[in-house]
Image: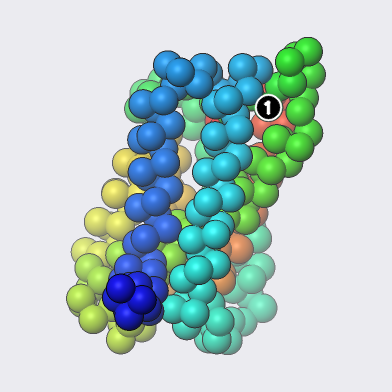
Amino acid sequence: MPSRISRWRSDPAIARCGPFALFIALLVLGSHLSPFLGEGGASGAASWFVVARGAIVALALAWFWPAYSELRKPSPAAAADWLLAALGGFAVFLVWIGLDQEWAVLSRSVGFIPHDPEGGTDWFKALARLAGFALVVPVMEELFWRSFLLRWLERHDFLSVAPRLVGMRAFLITTVLFSLEHDRWLAGAVAGAAYNRLYMRSGNLWVPIAAHGVTNAVLGVWILHTQNWQFW
């Protein structure tokens, strides 16, 4: 059994798909438990489940860390790539809140509401959620969508595929699937295309992770400031 677990841990596909699959499984579990946990707000249980979800995925990423060669020893990226990551990440944030029209949204929910029993903001929950949103989700999603799927669609031996050599077919399929993962499908498509392009241009996975992190961090701060919880 230990040797099998060791093989799973070092398998490049499992290492990139595992945390994402765990995240999706926790989302599904949360939706099934919602009648018992209540909504994501002041009832407490549901909001704690969301906080725990981020922590669990972070632990999975830490466990698989030795398999992430492109994160431990990244290819060099030019200063222009990091600048584009910052600007692109902020632009995706603007698109995300700007395309909040009914025709561009698949479904709506109340979102994550970090209230305490008195109706104020529970800052521990809020900041824990922000950390998961801005730090854990970008790493987990970029490992799956960009490092694995984008290159795997080009060739199943995906580690041998240089990002700049990914073709339009893989680019479009990944963009569409990434958009369908999100309620705001059109904004998700713009985000997916932007992160794909940043990865293909730079060849460094930290660049789209940085852009994704900027998007989520700015969005999270904006949500806390405006209390537009439905974006969470």
Amino acid tagged 1: Pro
Name the image quarter holding the C terminus.
top right
**Residue 222 drawn above or below residue 118:** below
Pick the front one: 94 or 229: 229
Residue 51 percent coordinates (x, y): 60, 39
Residue 180 percent coordinates (x, y): 32, 41
**Residue 33 drawn above or below residue 203:** above
Q: Quadrant of residue 218?
A: top right
Q: Residue at x 34, y 62 (%)?
A: 17
Pick the front one: 146 or 190: 146
Can residue 163 be seen here? The reply is no
Side of 58 relative to 221 (left or right):
left
Name the image quarter holding the N terminus.
bottom left
Can residue 207 be seen here? The reply is yes
Assess disc 1: are there few (<14), some (14-19) or many (≥20) residues with their C-alpha within 10 Å of its C-alpha: many
Q: Quadrant of residue 47?
A: top right
Q: Residue at x 36, y 43 (%)?
A: 25
Residue 72 percent coordinates (x, y): 56, 82
Residue furthest out toward the front: 1
Q: Residue at x 37, y 60 (%)?
A: 18
Residue 120 percent coordinates (x, y): 79, 19
- How does the figure colour the protein chain or chains? rainbow
In the structure shown, which secondary structural element does the residue marked by tag 1 occupy? Answer: loop
The residue beneath circle 1 is: 114
